[in-house]
Amino acid sequence: EFIEAAQVGGVSTASIVIRHIVPNVLGVVVVYASLLVPSMILFESFLSFLGLGTQEPLSSWGALLSDGANSMEVSPWLLLFPAGFLVVTLFCFNFIGDGLRDALDPKDR
């Protein structure tokens, strides 16, 4: 409705996009991107755990978890530390996404 009102008022299309559409869409895009990061980290870790992700010279949490799972009886910390850091990182990104959603939600303004 506010776009139609701006058009009736004679505002140019570029001004409508910059002053009305972008501020309302920007929050949604930022929140979606910040909530997409944890799922991509988890997906990459899962693929690396299966051996389909990054290869040997590079390191990944999935590769570290796979190595730790292979030697879990001898040295369980090789599994616990990467798993713990992965969980903490995923929670942090989710909390950041929730905070950004609360701060940037146009319906709460």
Image: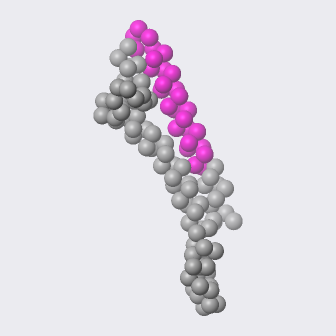
Find out whether residue 85 is within the magenta segment: yes
- Residue 8, image quadrant: bottom right
Q: Is residue 100 above or below residue 63?
A: below
Residue 85: x and y, percent? 53, 28
Q: In the depicted view, which residue is nearer to us: 28 or 55?
A: 55
In the picture, measured across the screen, residue 55 lies left or right of residue 83, that is: left
- Residue 40, image quadrant: top left
* Residue at figure coordinates x 48%, y 26% from the top left: 83
> By what rule are the colours in the image chosen?
one colour
Q: Is residue 10 above or below residue 18?
A: below
Q: In the picture, which quadrant includes the N terminus?
A: bottom right
Q: In the picture, which quadrant includes the C terminus?
A: bottom right
> What type of secondary structure mainly makes up the magenta span?
helix
- Residue 104, image quadrant: bottom right
Find out whether residue 56 is within the magenta segment: no
Question: Magenta segment, which residues?
Answer: 72-98
Q: Is residue 44 above or below residue 107?
A: above
* Residue at figure coordinates x 56%, y 66% from the top left: 25
Residue 58: x and y, percent? 40, 29
In the picture, measured across the screen, residue 53 lies left or right of residue 78, that is: left
